[in-house]
Image: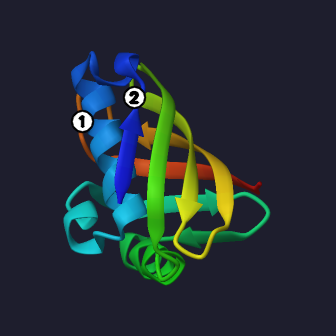
Amino acid sequence: MKVHIAQHCENAPKKKLVLKLTILWASGNVPEMGAYLADELEWDNVGQTHCKGKTNFLKEVEALTKSKVAELRITSIITHGKSAAVYGEMKMMDGTALAFSDLYEFTSASASILKSVTSFRIHL
């Protein structure tokens, strides 16, 4: 998978963490991603699905990543306190593309454990 990262996306520890999580997610690295998730994690994939619990989330991610990402472009990462947002585009191996935005809420401002994720996906 090719990864393109805007320069300003790596200039703070929380941004680096969000970048790592985004790459893990896009690459389908479910085992490593699980280390950053609260057991009671909630995921709202707006207009698609809603799930509760780390195990359910990882099953959903695993199912979604069967369509392999060929290229990941991260345009922006914004962090403040225990919240973060990432925006970018993915081009899939099958030629389809989508724009995405994920809104992350961590368990605290200093934590690396995700409490909730709200995702927006638009096919291009």
Above or below for 103 versus 34: above
11 relative position to 58: left or right? left
Closer to the camera, 36 or 67? 67
123 relative position to 101: left or right? right
33 relative position to 124: left or right? left
- Alpha carbon of mark 1 to alpha carbon of mark 2: how far? 8 Å
The x and y percentages for residue 19 are 33, 39
**First along the sequence among labels 1 and 2:** 2
User: Can you see residue 104?
Assistant: yes
Q: Residue at x 29, y 23 (%)?
A: 10
Q: Residue at x 36, y 19 (%)?
A: 7
Marks 1 and 2 in Cβ contact (< 8 Å): yes
Q: Which residue is mark 1?
A: 111
Instruction: Describe the element under mark 1 as helix, strand or loop.
Output: loop
The x and y percentages for residue 94 are 59, 76
Q: Where is the C terminus found, in terms of image quarters? A: bottom right
Amino acid under disc 2: Lys
Answer few, some or many: residues within 10 Å of disc 2's Cα (few below 14, many 20 plus, some between 14 and 19). some
Q: Residue at x 28, y 47 (%)?
A: 113
Amino acid under disc 1: Ala
Q: Which residue is mark 2?
A: 82
